[in-house]
Image: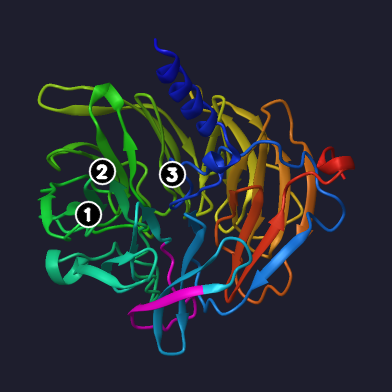
Amino acid sequence: MSPAFRALVGAALAASALPGAAAEWPQWRGPRRDGRSPETGLLRSWPEGGPPLLWRAPGLGTGYSSVSVAAGRIHTMGDLSDGQYVIAVAQSDGTLLWKTRVGPIHEDEYGGPRATPTIDGDGVYVTTTEGAVVALDGSTGVERWRRSLPGDFGGYLMKAMGSYDWRFSESPLVDGERVVVTPGHIEALMVALDRGTGEERWRTQGRRLGPLGSDGAAYASAVISEATGVRQYVQLVGRGLIAVEAETGRLLWNYNRIASDIANIATPLVEGDYVFASAGYGTGAALVRIAPGEESLEAEEVYFLEAGTLQNHHGGLVLHEGTVYTGTGHNRGFPIAVDLLSGQVRWGPVRAGGNGSAAASYADGRLYFRFQDGRMLLIEATPEEYREAGSFLIPDVQKESWSHPVVADGKLLLREQDDLLCYDLRPRGPEGAGEP
């Protein structure tokens, strides 16, 4: 190896270890869509009242979208007075950079967008509550192309409870040159769109997927799996878990038992040849193992946990060192830890300090639990026992505090309806080191 090449490799390795390499959260639930941040060196515990609030950015409108972070920008969605918008603010101080109207307001008791923008390169990709899939320029907000899940593919959502209409909630998955979304129609269960043009690349022909649940898309977002060496997109739809082949869109396998009759919401977890999923409304949780079948792949049930043991409503699942951490209970977020491979409960459920459903994320050995009433908890990610390391109440909570917490660039970002709050998670002891 020449000295010049050795220096080049060393520079590349050094760059990959820089804080900036871990500073981004470019899509729904983070870099790998698993709720995990690669950040390190964060506060091990919080002082009374929580970490310091650095800034607060108003003007984001109503809704439950989380945020994505990349290239110095934070992106989210919100309903303003005249429509539904994608909004970009500066990562440094929350200053508005641009906002682009992408659709009409979602007028409902739980109104506003639910999807989180996906940032990929110089593009931003979103799904509106009306089912429009829109690509925008990340620097300017200028619209590049759009498609309609119901209009172009006959898309529709699974049956909702009573008269509620929660609308489309999926955050688009960008994989290489494909933008993958879920119309839910039997002849277009999932579709892949060209990243640059929006043209259709493939669509998934569905089939009868079982008696539980109902036909249509659900409220989850797809994740990438390499189970059995086959690249595939795993999704939770109205009839439960499915996976389609990444290259062709061919339906590979499905698992119906995890389907709720009302709403399937939590994004599945993938680990090797395994997929873990959960649904609320009295459904439960399950682990399946993906294995070769006679014609395609098969999902073999490893275990099923009844709702009384574990059911995650919509707060998400986090896997850390073989243990699944989440909030359990319908309309509840009692922290619980479950061994992934055996389903054995390690600890919990714990009646922690917050009320309602809880959204969970992970960073640097800690769980960030955000409850519906605005209570934030810091919990050690250990299967040994429940250990709380701090809490605080998000200010001025007016509605359900459902947006998922984000950890990026040493900051905790919390979307709270019209506001975005940025908290400092870096220790500030002597010479900037050590705990406060």
- Type of amino acid under label 3: Arg
Residue nearest the observer in this picture, 154 or 145: 145
Q: Are marks 2 and 1 in contact (CB under 8 Å)?
A: yes
- Type of amino acid under label 1: Arg
Q: Which residue is mark 2?
A: 176
N-terminal of the pair, mark 3 or mark 2, is 3
Q: Is residue 359 above or below residue 152?
A: above
Residue nearest the observer in this picture, 186 or 208: 186
Q: Can residue 267 be found in the magenta stretch?
A: no
Residue 26 locus on image (x, y percent): 45, 51
Q: Is residue 310 visible?
A: no
- Type of amino acid under label 2: Gly
Specify start and end residues of the magenta stretch as a single range.
97-115
- For the point 14% across and 28% down, which residue is it? 296
- For the point 23% across and 66% down, which residue is it? 156
- Residue 195 numbered tag: 1
Q: Which quadrant of the figure contains the N terminus?
A: top left
Outermost residue to the bottom: 82
